Image (tube, grey):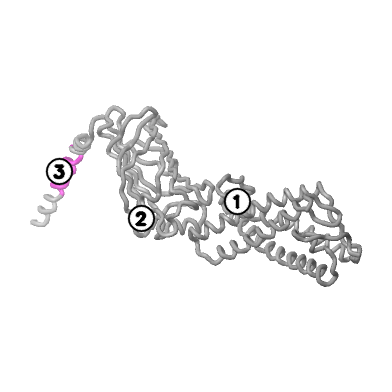
């Protein structure tokens, strides 16, 4: 009897909590959001993050196969907009196994020690040609100020809000210690690495 | 020494082409051998980049050399040669020219197939000759290495013949390709 009553009480309490949670959910979500902000998440299949580097005097390309993007954005509320990108360094692909292995090694990306690169921008500014994300870029454990210009447009596709973000920037690899020992030399592998991205972001 | 060839002597331009290419081939063998022993590293990259640049230089020189050859007399082979020797001499020289094209071209194609564009001393990038393809790269690597050994064999034959002409036949065949020598007319 006691057991039965107790079980019923637990069920009732659980139902009560669930109801409360459901009722509160939209309210808490709204409370966390600044007005007008839309959350965007990455559509990995239709997004690319590429890098171009000079190797032995010629331009060579690579890309990252895995990265995450969280973009909170409102053109009317840039103060509350922010961008967060995490890159899985182990997913770098330059189309050459030997080169990829070398790139992931201790003297370059050092993926075992520094598996991720991270860009966190809490400041989004309007520029003449679009926007720029100003924040901190961390590669190989080194964090530096970085600003990434980008363009952003939203469209409605099959009733869903979709954002397209693209841009290019450049990173001096040695600023982040990408290149130890012999790889510090820039005659064979250039210091300047061009990074370009074209992302499809889905509003949530 | 005249710039142009005569019937009995290679001119300064032909000699310059010949000896410049000799020196560059020695550089090529040295760079390739040094790079071969290294694991993937910045130094290996640097050696191979130079190997490619020098290879393209040789290709350019060979094109110029053949153009120059076509605009000039070719010194005659000594009359003393037997028909088979005459054939062997022509064959060896033709093989050397073919290899001087085939070596850099197979190297260039190999680089393209690997997906590594070739730059000439960082000054300009050459177009890719073939699309990126792993099995094609491996086939071209084998081709390039095999051709290197074929070149070594033909060069050996070429040098042996030159020395035979000089020390055994005592004609002017070697001397007429050497600067700072005088060549009398055909061997008496």
Alpha carbon distance from label 3 to label 2: 43 Å
Residue visible at 61% across and 46% down in the picture = B126
Circle 1 crowding by C-alpha within 10 Å: few under 14, some 14–19, many from 20: many
Alpha carbon distance from label 1 to label 3: 68 Å
Comparing A112 with A136, the one in front is A136
Residue A50, image x, y percentages = 45, 44
- Which residue is labeled 1 in the image? B112
Instruction: Check if mark 1's residue and mark 2's residue have beta carbons within 8 Å.
Output: no
In the image, which disc is placed on residue A70?
A: none
- Which residue is labeled 2 in the image? A115
> Residue A74 is drawn in which quadrant?
top left
Residue visible at 50% across and 53% down in the picture = A188
In the image, which disc is placed on residue A16?
A: 3
Tell me where the magenta segment starts and ends, as one range: A11-23
Residue visible at 18% across and 41% down in the picture = A21
Q: Dot 3 falls on which chain? A: A
Residue B79, image x, y percentages = 91, 62
Circle 1 or circle 2, nearest the eye: 1
């Amino acid at each position: 009897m006691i057991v039965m009553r107790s079980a019923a009480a637990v069920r009732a309490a659980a139902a009560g909590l669930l109801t409360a949670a459901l009722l509160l959910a939209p309210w808490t979500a709204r409370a966390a959001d600044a007005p007008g902000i839309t959350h965007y998440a990455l559509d990995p299949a239709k997004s690319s993050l590429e890098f171009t580097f000079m190797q032995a005097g010629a331009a060579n390309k690579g890309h990252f196969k895995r990265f995450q993007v969280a973009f909170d954005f409102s053109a009317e509320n840039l103060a509350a907009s922010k961008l967060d990108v995490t890159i899985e360094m182990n997913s770098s692909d330059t189309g050459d196994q030997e080169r990829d292995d070398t790139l992931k090694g201790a003297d370059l990306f050092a993926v075992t020690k520094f598996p991720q690169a991270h860009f966190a921008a809490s400041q989004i500014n309007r520029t003449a040609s679009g926007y720029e994300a100003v924040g901190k870029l961390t590669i190989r454990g080194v964090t530096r100020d970085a600003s990434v210009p980008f363009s952003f447009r939203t469209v409605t596709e099959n009733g869903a809000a979709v954002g397209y973000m693209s841009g290019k920037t450049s990173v001096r690899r040695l600023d982040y210690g990408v290149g130890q020992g012999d790889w510090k030399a820039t005659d064979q592998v250039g210091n300047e690495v061009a990074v370009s991205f074209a992302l499809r972001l889905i509003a949530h | 020494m005249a710039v142009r060839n005569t019937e009995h002597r290679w001119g300064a331009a032909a000699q310059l082409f010949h000896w410049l290419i000799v020196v560059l081939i020695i550089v090529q063998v040295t760079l390739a051998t040094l790079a071969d022993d290294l694991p993937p590293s910045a130094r290996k990259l640097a050696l191979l980049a130079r190997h490619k640049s020098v290879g393209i230089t040789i290709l350019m020189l060979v094109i110029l050399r053949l153009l120059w050859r076509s605009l000039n007399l070719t010194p005659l082979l000594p009359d003393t040669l037997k028909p088979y020797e005459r054939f062997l001499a022509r064959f060896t020289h033709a093989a050397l020219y073919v290899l001087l094209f085939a070596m850099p071209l197979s190297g260039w194609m190999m680089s393209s197939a690997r997906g590594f564009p070739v730059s000439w001393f960082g000054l300009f990038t050459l177009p890719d000759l073939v699309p990126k393809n792993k099995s094609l790269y491996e086939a071209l690597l084998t081709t390039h290495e095999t051709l290197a050994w074929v070149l070594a064999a033909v060069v050996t034959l070429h040098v042996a013949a030159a020395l035979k002409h000089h020390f055994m036949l005592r004609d002017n065949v070697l001397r007429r390709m050497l600067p700072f020598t005088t060549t009398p007319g055909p061997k008496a």
